[in-house]
Amino acid sequence: MKLAILGMGAVGRGILEVLDGKELGLTVTGLADSKSGLMDRDGIHIEEVLAAKRERGFCGDKYISATDIVEQADYDVLVEVTPTDARTGEPATGFIKAAIGRGKHVVTSNKGPVALHHAVLQSMARKHGVAFRYEATVGGAIPIMHTLEHGLAGNRVLAVFGILNGTCNFILTRMAAENLTYDQALLEAREMGYAEADPTYDVKGIDAAIKLVILSNTIWKRNVKLDDVGITGIDMLTTDALRLAEEQHCTIRLIAEAVPERGILRVAPRVLPKNHPLVVDGSLNAITLETDMAGEITLIGKGAGSRETASAIIGDVLFIREMHVRGH
Amino acid sequence: MQVSMKLEMKDTPGQLVAALKPISEVGGNIIAVIHQRDEKTNGDVLAVQIVLELQEQKLGELLSLIKGQGVNVVRIGKERLLYKQTVIMIGHIMHTDLGDTVERIDCTGYAEVTELTLVMPAISEPSSARLVIRAVNREDMEQALGILRGIAKEKQLLIIEPLEETG
Protein backbone atom coordinates (compact mmCIF):
# COMPACT_ATOMS: atom_id res chain seq x y z
CA MET A 1 0.00 0.00 0.00
CA LYS A 2 1.23 3.48 -0.90
CA LEU A 3 1.58 6.31 1.60
CA ALA A 4 2.09 10.03 1.20
CA ILE A 5 3.51 11.55 4.37
CA LEU A 6 3.22 15.24 5.21
CA GLY A 7 5.50 16.47 7.97
CA MET A 8 9.00 15.48 8.94
CA GLY A 9 9.07 16.54 12.57
CA ALA A 10 9.56 14.01 15.37
CA VAL A 11 6.41 12.10 14.37
CA GLY A 12 7.12 12.04 10.62
CA ARG A 13 10.69 10.90 11.16
CA GLY A 14 9.52 8.29 13.66
CA ILE A 15 7.17 6.81 11.06
CA LEU A 16 9.86 6.78 8.38
CA GLU A 17 12.33 5.06 10.71
CA VAL A 18 9.77 2.38 11.56
CA LEU A 19 8.91 1.87 7.88
CA ASP A 20 12.61 1.55 7.11
CA GLY A 21 13.19 -1.00 9.83
CA LYS A 22 10.11 -3.19 9.52
CA GLU A 23 8.68 -5.21 6.63
CA LEU A 24 5.13 -3.92 6.71
CA GLY A 25 4.40 -3.85 3.00
CA LEU A 26 4.05 -0.08 2.99
CA THR A 27 5.69 2.11 0.35
CA VAL A 28 6.19 5.86 0.69
CA THR A 29 5.39 7.48 -2.65
CA GLY A 30 5.11 11.10 -1.52
CA LEU A 31 6.78 13.10 1.22
CA ALA A 32 6.83 16.74 2.21
CA ASP A 33 8.22 18.90 4.99
CA SER A 34 7.61 22.61 5.47
CA LYS A 35 10.19 23.58 2.84
CA SER A 36 10.14 20.90 0.17
CA GLY A 37 8.60 17.77 -1.24
CA LEU A 38 9.30 14.73 -3.35
CA MET A 39 7.31 12.01 -5.02
CA ASP A 40 8.23 8.70 -6.53
CA ARG A 41 5.63 6.24 -7.73
CA ASP A 42 8.03 3.33 -7.18
CA GLY A 43 8.83 4.26 -3.62
CA ILE A 44 11.05 6.84 -1.99
CA HIS A 45 14.35 5.64 -0.56
CA ILE A 46 13.74 6.31 3.12
CA GLU A 47 17.31 6.15 4.37
CA GLU A 48 18.47 8.69 1.79
CA VAL A 49 15.65 11.08 2.61
CA LEU A 50 16.29 10.89 6.35
CA ALA A 51 19.98 11.57 5.73
CA ALA A 52 19.16 14.53 3.46
CA LYS A 53 16.85 15.99 6.10
CA ARG A 54 19.55 15.59 8.74
CA GLU A 55 22.27 17.14 6.64
CA ARG A 56 20.60 20.04 4.85
CA GLY A 57 17.38 20.54 6.82
CA PHE A 58 14.86 19.67 4.12
CA CYS A 59 13.86 16.45 2.42
CA GLY A 60 13.30 17.06 -1.27
CA ASP A 61 12.73 19.53 -4.05
CA LYS A 62 12.01 23.10 -2.93
CA TYR A 63 9.72 23.60 -5.90
CA ILE A 64 7.41 20.81 -4.74
CA SER A 65 5.04 21.73 -1.92
CA ALA A 66 2.91 19.70 0.47
CA THR A 67 -0.13 20.75 -1.57
CA ASP A 68 1.49 19.32 -4.70
CA ILE A 69 2.02 16.01 -2.92
CA VAL A 70 -1.59 15.89 -1.71
CA GLU A 71 -2.99 16.77 -5.12
CA GLN A 72 -0.65 14.97 -7.47
CA ALA A 73 1.19 12.10 -5.80
CA ASP A 74 0.08 8.52 -6.35
CA TYR A 75 -0.94 7.16 -2.92
CA ASP A 76 -3.66 5.22 -1.09
CA VAL A 77 -3.37 6.85 2.34
CA LEU A 78 -2.36 10.38 3.25
CA VAL A 79 -0.45 10.39 6.55
CA GLU A 80 -0.86 13.94 7.80
CA VAL A 81 1.60 14.67 10.64
CA THR A 82 2.30 18.39 10.27
CA PRO A 83 2.38 20.63 13.39
CA THR A 84 -0.92 21.33 15.14
CA ASP A 85 -2.58 24.72 14.94
CA ALA A 86 -5.38 24.37 17.47
CA ARG A 87 -7.03 27.68 16.57
CA THR A 88 -7.40 27.31 12.82
CA GLY A 89 -6.55 23.68 12.17
CA GLU A 90 -4.71 24.85 9.05
CA PRO A 91 -3.01 24.06 6.82
CA ALA A 92 -3.70 20.46 7.90
CA THR A 93 -7.48 20.63 7.42
CA GLY A 94 -7.00 21.81 3.83
CA PHE A 95 -4.63 18.91 3.10
CA ILE A 96 -7.04 16.40 4.65
CA LYS A 97 -10.04 17.70 2.71
CA ALA A 98 -8.10 17.69 -0.54
CA ALA A 99 -7.00 14.09 -0.03
CA ILE A 100 -10.49 12.91 0.91
CA GLY A 101 -11.82 14.79 -2.12
CA ARG A 102 -9.46 12.69 -4.27
CA GLY A 103 -10.88 9.54 -2.68
CA LYS A 104 -7.83 8.90 -0.52
CA HIS A 105 -7.85 7.58 3.04
CA VAL A 106 -6.40 9.89 5.69
CA VAL A 107 -4.53 9.12 8.91
CA THR A 108 -3.47 12.02 11.12
CA SER A 109 -1.82 12.80 14.43
CA ASN A 110 -2.90 16.41 14.11
CA LYS A 111 -5.28 17.49 16.88
CA GLY A 112 -6.35 20.78 15.29
CA PRO A 113 -8.42 19.44 12.39
CA VAL A 114 -10.01 16.67 14.48
CA ALA A 115 -10.93 18.91 17.41
CA LEU A 116 -12.34 21.62 15.15
CA HIS A 117 -13.89 19.74 12.24
CA HIS A 118 -14.51 16.16 13.34
CA ALA A 119 -18.09 15.92 12.06
CA VAL A 120 -17.37 17.59 8.71
CA LEU A 121 -14.30 15.49 7.98
CA GLN A 122 -16.02 12.25 8.99
CA SER A 123 -19.04 12.89 6.83
CA MET A 124 -16.83 13.92 3.91
CA ALA A 125 -14.88 10.70 4.30
CA ARG A 126 -18.08 8.66 4.42
CA LYS A 127 -19.36 10.33 1.28
CA HIS A 128 -16.17 9.48 -0.57
CA GLY A 129 -16.06 5.95 0.81
CA VAL A 130 -12.71 6.43 2.52
CA ALA A 131 -11.47 6.22 6.10
CA PHE A 132 -10.46 9.17 8.26
CA ARG A 133 -8.53 7.95 11.29
CA TYR A 134 -6.77 9.80 14.09
CA GLU A 135 -5.69 7.29 16.75
CA ALA A 136 -2.45 9.23 17.36
CA THR A 137 -4.24 12.43 18.43
CA VAL A 138 -5.16 11.14 21.91
CA GLY A 139 -3.09 9.15 24.36
CA GLY A 140 -0.04 8.60 22.14
CA ALA A 141 0.52 4.87 21.75
CA ILE A 142 -2.66 3.90 23.65
CA PRO A 143 -5.11 2.34 21.17
CA ILE A 144 -8.05 4.28 22.59
CA MET A 145 -9.92 4.83 19.33
CA HIS A 146 -9.65 1.19 18.27
CA THR A 147 -10.80 0.16 21.74
CA LEU A 148 -13.79 2.46 21.55
CA GLU A 149 -14.81 1.61 18.01
CA HIS A 150 -14.14 -2.10 17.92
CA GLY A 151 -13.18 -3.62 21.26
CA LEU A 152 -16.10 -1.98 23.03
CA ALA A 153 -18.52 -1.96 20.09
CA GLY A 154 -22.12 -2.15 21.32
CA ASN A 155 -21.28 -0.69 24.72
CA ARG A 156 -22.73 2.58 25.83
CA VAL A 157 -19.92 4.73 27.17
CA LEU A 158 -21.16 6.58 30.26
CA ALA A 159 -18.05 8.52 31.18
CA VAL A 160 -14.43 9.11 30.31
CA PHE A 161 -11.66 10.08 32.72
CA GLY A 162 -8.13 10.56 31.56
CA ILE A 163 -4.62 11.70 32.14
CA LEU A 164 -4.05 13.05 28.67
CA ASN A 165 -1.01 15.26 29.06
CA GLY A 166 2.32 13.65 29.84
CA THR A 167 4.06 16.94 30.58
CA CYS A 168 1.65 17.82 33.39
CA ASN A 169 1.79 14.30 34.74
CA PHE A 170 5.58 14.40 34.78
CA ILE A 171 5.59 17.73 36.63
CA LEU A 172 3.06 16.56 39.25
CA THR A 173 4.89 13.27 39.76
CA ARG A 174 8.17 15.11 40.35
CA MET A 175 6.61 17.70 42.66
CA ALA A 176 5.16 14.93 44.84
CA ALA A 177 8.15 12.59 44.77
CA GLU A 178 10.94 15.12 45.28
CA ASN A 179 9.18 18.02 46.97
CA LEU A 180 10.03 20.24 44.01
CA THR A 181 8.27 23.53 43.41
CA TYR A 182 6.22 23.86 40.26
CA ASP A 183 8.94 25.98 38.63
CA GLN A 184 11.67 23.49 39.48
CA ALA A 185 9.66 20.56 38.12
CA LEU A 186 8.84 22.49 34.95
CA LEU A 187 12.51 23.24 34.43
CA GLU A 188 13.31 19.58 34.83
CA ALA A 189 10.57 18.64 32.35
CA ARG A 190 12.16 21.01 29.85
CA GLU A 191 15.61 19.56 30.37
CA MET A 192 14.24 16.07 29.85
CA GLY A 193 12.56 17.19 26.64
CA TYR A 194 9.02 16.64 28.00
CA ALA A 195 8.07 20.32 27.93
CA GLU A 196 8.20 22.81 25.10
CA ALA A 197 10.04 26.13 25.41
CA ASP A 198 6.57 27.65 25.75
CA PRO A 199 4.71 25.17 27.96
CA THR A 200 1.47 27.19 28.13
CA TYR A 201 -0.62 24.72 26.12
CA ASP A 202 0.38 21.85 28.35
CA VAL A 203 0.39 23.36 31.83
CA LYS A 204 -2.76 25.43 31.37
CA GLY A 205 -4.66 22.27 30.51
CA ILE A 206 -5.45 23.30 26.93
CA ASP A 207 -3.77 20.32 25.29
CA ALA A 208 -5.66 17.92 27.57
CA ALA A 209 -8.89 19.79 26.82
CA ILE A 210 -8.39 19.50 23.05
CA LYS A 211 -7.91 15.75 23.47
CA LEU A 212 -11.03 15.58 25.62
CA VAL A 213 -12.97 17.32 22.84
CA ILE A 214 -11.70 14.72 20.35
CA LEU A 215 -12.62 11.84 22.66
CA SER A 216 -16.06 13.27 23.42
CA ASN A 217 -16.91 13.87 19.78
CA THR A 218 -15.71 10.40 18.84
CA ILE A 219 -17.84 8.75 21.52
CA TRP A 220 -20.97 10.88 21.75
CA LYS A 221 -20.89 12.84 18.48
CA ARG A 222 -22.32 15.94 20.08
CA ASN A 223 -19.98 18.36 18.39
CA VAL A 224 -18.52 19.88 21.54
CA LYS A 225 -15.89 22.60 21.16
CA LEU A 226 -12.84 23.64 23.13
CA ASP A 227 -14.82 26.56 24.55
CA ASP A 228 -17.31 24.10 26.10
CA VAL A 229 -14.59 22.61 28.32
CA GLY A 230 -14.04 24.06 31.80
CA ILE A 231 -10.27 24.29 32.03
CA THR A 232 -7.99 24.72 35.06
CA GLY A 233 -4.27 24.11 34.63
CA ILE A 234 -1.58 22.99 37.04
CA ASP A 235 0.55 26.16 37.03
CA MET A 236 -0.86 27.45 40.34
CA LEU A 237 -0.19 24.25 42.28
CA THR A 238 2.02 24.38 45.35
CA THR A 239 4.30 21.74 46.79
CA ASP A 240 2.30 22.12 50.02
CA ALA A 241 -0.89 21.11 48.22
CA LEU A 242 0.73 17.89 47.03
CA ARG A 243 2.05 17.19 50.51
CA LEU A 244 -1.37 17.77 52.05
CA ALA A 245 -2.79 15.23 49.61
CA GLU A 246 0.06 12.83 50.30
CA GLU A 247 -0.71 12.87 54.04
CA GLN A 248 -4.04 11.29 53.23
CA HIS A 249 -2.55 8.71 50.86
CA CYS A 250 -3.79 10.77 47.96
CA THR A 251 -2.12 12.73 45.21
CA ILE A 252 -3.01 15.36 42.62
CA ARG A 253 -3.31 14.71 38.91
CA LEU A 254 -4.60 16.75 35.98
CA ILE A 255 -7.77 14.89 35.04
CA ALA A 256 -9.84 15.34 31.89
CA GLU A 257 -13.40 14.28 32.60
CA ALA A 258 -16.50 13.92 30.44
CA VAL A 259 -19.82 12.72 31.86
CA PRO A 260 -22.52 13.92 29.45
CA GLU A 261 -25.43 12.78 31.63
CA ARG A 262 -24.26 15.09 34.38
CA GLY A 263 -23.22 17.87 32.03
CA ILE A 264 -19.57 17.49 33.00
CA LEU A 265 -16.85 18.39 30.51
CA ARG A 266 -13.75 19.64 32.24
CA VAL A 267 -10.02 19.50 32.76
CA ALA A 268 -8.78 20.28 36.26
CA PRO A 269 -6.28 19.14 38.86
CA ARG A 270 -8.01 16.64 41.17
CA VAL A 271 -7.30 14.84 44.39
CA LEU A 272 -7.36 11.07 44.05
CA PRO A 273 -6.18 8.08 46.10
CA LYS A 274 -2.66 6.97 45.21
CA ASN A 275 -3.89 3.48 44.45
CA HIS A 276 -6.44 4.76 41.93
CA PRO A 277 -5.90 3.15 38.49
CA LEU A 278 -5.50 6.59 36.88
CA VAL A 279 -2.56 7.50 39.07
CA VAL A 280 0.32 6.78 36.70
CA ASP A 281 3.83 8.15 37.06
CA GLY A 282 6.06 10.26 34.86
CA SER A 283 4.97 11.09 31.36
CA LEU A 284 2.53 8.18 31.05
CA ASN A 285 -1.06 8.67 29.97
CA ALA A 286 -4.08 6.76 31.28
CA ILE A 287 -7.71 6.64 30.21
CA THR A 288 -10.65 5.09 32.08
CA LEU A 289 -13.87 4.36 30.20
CA GLU A 290 -17.06 3.61 32.08
CA THR A 291 -19.36 1.49 30.01
CA ASP A 292 -22.70 -0.25 30.46
CA MET A 293 -21.57 -3.78 29.58
CA ALA A 294 -17.81 -3.94 30.05
CA GLY A 295 -17.88 -1.87 33.23
CA GLU A 296 -14.70 0.05 33.82
CA ILE A 297 -11.72 -0.25 31.48
CA THR A 298 -8.45 1.55 32.05
CA LEU A 299 -5.73 1.80 29.42
CA ILE A 300 -2.24 2.99 30.32
CA GLY A 301 0.62 3.77 27.97
CA LYS A 302 3.13 6.19 26.63
CA GLY A 303 1.45 9.44 25.71
CA ALA A 304 4.11 10.87 23.45
CA GLY A 305 7.37 10.08 21.69
CA SER A 306 8.09 9.66 18.00
CA ARG A 307 8.16 5.86 17.92
CA GLU A 308 5.08 5.58 20.17
CA THR A 309 3.13 7.98 17.98
CA ALA A 310 4.34 6.07 14.93
CA SER A 311 2.77 2.97 16.51
CA ALA A 312 -0.64 4.66 16.55
CA ILE A 313 -0.26 5.93 12.97
CA ILE A 314 0.91 2.57 11.60
CA GLY A 315 -1.95 0.86 13.45
CA ASP A 316 -4.44 3.10 11.64
CA VAL A 317 -2.77 2.58 8.27
CA LEU A 318 -2.72 -1.21 8.59
CA PHE A 319 -6.31 -1.20 9.80
CA ILE A 320 -7.30 0.69 6.64
CA ARG A 321 -5.44 -1.82 4.52
CA GLU A 322 -7.29 -4.64 6.22
CA MET A 323 -10.71 -3.03 5.83
CA HIS A 324 -10.61 -1.11 2.59
CA VAL A 325 -7.77 -1.90 0.28
CA ARG A 326 -7.77 -5.07 -1.75
CA GLY A 327 -4.99 -6.56 -3.81
CA HIS A 328 -2.09 -5.18 -1.80
CA MET B 1 -34.19 9.25 66.13
CA GLN B 2 -31.46 9.16 63.49
CA VAL B 3 -29.15 6.16 63.38
CA SER B 4 -26.20 5.35 61.18
CA MET B 5 -25.06 1.82 60.51
CA LYS B 6 -22.33 0.15 58.62
CA LEU B 7 -23.48 -3.04 56.95
CA GLU B 8 -21.48 -5.78 55.28
CA MET B 9 -23.02 -8.27 52.94
CA LYS B 10 -22.21 -10.56 50.06
CA ASP B 11 -21.59 -8.57 46.90
CA THR B 12 -24.29 -10.35 44.91
CA PRO B 13 -27.33 -8.98 43.07
CA GLY B 14 -30.30 -8.35 45.31
CA GLN B 15 -28.36 -8.38 48.56
CA LEU B 16 -28.48 -4.64 49.11
CA VAL B 17 -32.22 -4.52 48.49
CA ALA B 18 -32.71 -7.43 50.90
CA ALA B 19 -30.62 -5.66 53.53
CA LEU B 20 -32.65 -2.48 53.28
CA LYS B 21 -36.09 -4.08 53.14
CA PRO B 22 -36.48 -4.51 56.94
CA ILE B 23 -36.16 -0.75 57.42
CA SER B 24 -39.52 -0.03 55.85
CA GLU B 25 -40.99 -3.10 57.58
CA VAL B 26 -40.39 -1.49 60.98
CA GLY B 27 -41.64 1.89 59.75
CA GLY B 28 -38.21 3.44 59.37
CA ASN B 29 -37.16 5.96 56.77
CA ILE B 30 -33.90 5.74 54.81
CA ILE B 31 -32.06 9.04 54.67
CA ALA B 32 -28.88 7.97 52.94
CA VAL B 33 -27.21 4.89 51.53
CA ILE B 34 -23.51 5.43 51.00
CA HIS B 35 -21.16 3.16 49.16
CA GLN B 36 -17.75 4.70 48.80
CA ARG B 37 -15.29 2.83 46.70
CA ASP B 38 -12.31 3.53 48.90
CA GLU B 39 -13.85 1.40 51.66
CA LYS B 40 -11.45 -1.45 52.22
CA THR B 41 -13.24 -4.78 52.09
CA ASN B 42 -12.50 -8.29 50.93
CA GLY B 43 -13.24 -8.81 47.27
CA ASP B 44 -16.72 -10.31 47.51
CA VAL B 45 -17.98 -8.28 50.47
CA LEU B 46 -20.04 -5.16 49.90
CA ALA B 47 -19.84 -2.55 52.65
CA VAL B 48 -22.41 0.22 52.80
CA GLN B 49 -23.20 2.89 55.31
CA ILE B 50 -26.79 3.86 55.87
CA VAL B 51 -28.45 6.65 57.75
CA LEU B 52 -32.05 6.17 58.75
CA GLU B 53 -34.79 7.64 60.88
CA LEU B 54 -36.88 5.38 63.12
CA GLN B 55 -38.55 5.07 66.52
CA GLU B 56 -36.00 4.21 69.17
CA GLN B 57 -37.90 1.16 70.46
CA LYS B 58 -37.87 -0.38 66.96
CA LEU B 59 -34.07 -0.56 66.75
CA GLY B 60 -33.71 -4.02 68.32
CA GLU B 61 -36.33 -5.49 66.02
CA LEU B 62 -34.67 -3.91 62.98
CA LEU B 63 -31.26 -5.30 63.88
CA SER B 64 -32.52 -8.84 64.18
CA LEU B 65 -34.43 -8.54 60.91
CA ILE B 66 -31.32 -7.27 59.13
CA LYS B 67 -29.20 -10.07 60.59
CA GLY B 68 -31.91 -12.49 59.47
CA GLN B 69 -31.15 -11.44 55.90
CA GLY B 70 -27.58 -12.67 56.33
CA VAL B 71 -26.25 -9.13 56.63
CA ASN B 72 -23.60 -8.24 59.14
CA VAL B 73 -24.12 -5.02 61.16
CA VAL B 74 -20.57 -3.84 61.73
CA ARG B 75 -21.23 -0.59 63.54
CA ILE B 76 -24.09 1.50 64.83
CA GLY B 77 -23.76 5.14 65.67
CA LYS B 78 -25.48 8.46 65.74
CA GLU B 79 -23.28 10.47 63.45
CA ARG B 80 -25.24 11.76 60.55
CA LEU B 81 -22.59 13.03 58.13
CA LEU B 82 -21.03 9.87 56.83
CA TYR B 83 -20.07 10.95 53.37
CA LYS B 84 -16.54 12.28 53.43
CA GLN B 85 -14.44 14.03 50.82
CA THR B 86 -11.12 15.84 50.84
CA VAL B 87 -10.67 19.12 49.02
CA ILE B 88 -7.48 21.10 48.63
CA MET B 89 -7.46 24.86 48.34
CA ILE B 90 -4.70 27.15 47.13
CA GLY B 91 -4.54 30.93 47.29
CA HIS B 92 -4.84 33.70 49.82
CA ILE B 93 -6.97 31.59 52.06
CA MET B 94 -6.62 33.50 55.34
CA HIS B 95 -6.87 36.96 53.85
CA THR B 96 -10.08 36.09 52.04
CA ASP B 97 -11.79 35.31 55.37
CA LEU B 98 -11.34 31.63 56.03
CA GLY B 99 -13.99 31.78 58.76
CA ASP B 100 -16.54 32.88 56.21
CA THR B 101 -15.49 30.16 53.76
CA VAL B 102 -16.03 27.45 56.37
CA GLU B 103 -19.23 29.00 57.70
CA ARG B 104 -20.83 29.02 54.28
CA ILE B 105 -20.49 25.24 54.13
CA ASP B 106 -21.40 24.65 57.79
CA CYS B 107 -24.54 26.78 57.66
CA THR B 108 -26.13 24.52 55.04
CA GLY B 109 -27.10 22.02 57.72
CA TYR B 110 -26.33 19.09 55.40
CA ALA B 111 -22.55 19.48 55.13
CA GLU B 112 -19.73 20.53 57.42
CA VAL B 113 -16.03 21.23 57.26
CA THR B 114 -14.80 18.82 59.92
CA GLU B 115 -11.04 19.16 59.50
CA LEU B 116 -8.84 21.93 58.23
CA THR B 117 -5.09 21.86 57.73
CA LEU B 118 -3.48 25.08 56.61
CA VAL B 119 0.07 25.60 55.40
CA MET B 120 1.26 29.19 55.13
CA PRO B 121 4.63 29.83 53.54
CA ALA B 122 6.16 33.31 53.25
CA ILE B 123 3.80 36.28 53.34
CA SER B 124 2.35 37.13 49.91
CA GLU B 125 2.93 33.57 48.72
CA PRO B 126 -0.22 31.52 48.25
CA SER B 127 -1.09 29.20 51.10
CA SER B 128 -2.51 25.70 50.77
CA ALA B 129 -5.22 24.07 52.82
CA ARG B 130 -6.82 20.67 53.09
CA LEU B 131 -10.48 20.61 54.01
CA VAL B 132 -12.33 17.48 54.98
CA ILE B 133 -15.98 17.96 54.23
CA ARG B 134 -18.65 15.64 55.56
CA ALA B 135 -22.16 15.49 54.20
CA VAL B 136 -25.28 13.41 54.57
CA ASN B 137 -25.02 11.82 51.14
CA ARG B 138 -23.53 12.18 47.72
CA GLU B 139 -26.10 14.71 46.47
CA ASP B 140 -25.51 16.95 49.47
CA MET B 141 -21.76 16.64 48.95
CA GLU B 142 -22.21 17.77 45.36
CA GLN B 143 -24.22 20.76 46.62
CA ALA B 144 -21.53 21.62 49.15
CA LEU B 145 -18.83 21.39 46.50
CA GLY B 146 -20.94 23.67 44.33
CA ILE B 147 -20.99 26.26 47.10
CA LEU B 148 -17.25 25.91 47.49
CA ARG B 149 -16.74 26.43 43.74
CA GLY B 150 -18.71 29.67 43.99
CA ILE B 151 -16.60 30.84 46.93
CA ALA B 152 -13.40 29.94 45.10
CA LYS B 153 -14.43 32.00 42.11
CA GLU B 154 -15.40 34.97 44.25
CA LYS B 155 -12.24 34.85 46.40
CA GLN B 156 -9.93 33.82 43.55
CA LEU B 157 -8.91 30.58 45.19
CA LEU B 158 -8.01 27.42 43.34
CA ILE B 159 -9.92 24.41 44.60
CA ILE B 160 -8.81 20.92 43.81
CA GLU B 161 -11.78 18.63 44.07
CA PRO B 162 -11.70 14.91 44.65
CA LEU B 163 -12.23 12.74 41.62
CA GLU B 164 -15.39 10.82 42.05
CA GLU B 165 -16.45 8.49 39.32
CA THR B 166 -20.01 7.75 38.43
CA GLY B 167 -19.94 3.98 38.88
Image: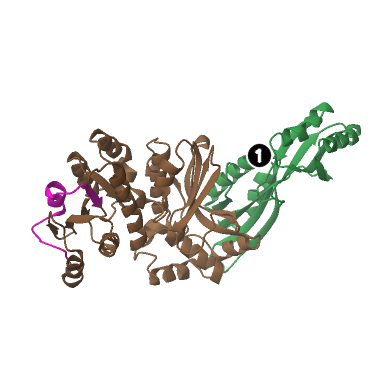
Chain colours: A brown, B green
**Can you say which quadrant of the picture contains the C terminus of chain B?**
top right
State how many labels appear.
Answer: 1
Indicate the chain on which mark 1 is placed.
Answer: B
On the picture, is B103 further left or further right than A51? right
Rendered location of residue B82, percent (x, y): 73, 45
Residue at 19% in and 67% down: A53
The residue carrying pointer 1 sits among few (fewer than 14), some (14 to 19) or many (20 or more) residues within 10 Å by Cα, namely: some
Rendered location of residue B63, percent (x, y): 86, 37
Residue tagged 1: B140
A294, A225: nearer the viewer: A294
Residue at 70% in and 52% down: B40
Residue ranking furthest to the front: A327
On the picture, is A138 further left or further right than A173? left
Q: From this viewpoint, is residue A282 visible?
A: yes
Helix, strand or loop under label 1: helix
Rendered location of residue A324, percent (x, y): 27, 41
**Can you say which quadrant of the picture contains the N terminus of chain B?**
top right
Compared with A227, A45 (above or below) is below
Residue at 24% in and 55% down: A26
B37, A235: nearer the viewer: B37
On the picture, is A84 further left or further right than B26? left
Rendered location of residue A287, percent (x, y): 48, 51
Query: Which quadrant of the view contains residue A97?
Result: top left
Is A69 colored magenta in this rendering?
yes
Q: From this viewpoint, is residue B109 visible?
A: no
Task: Inspect the image, locate mark 1, and give the three-letter code of the amino acid beneath it.
Answer: Asp
User: For the magenta stretch, what is the residue range?
Assistant: A58-79
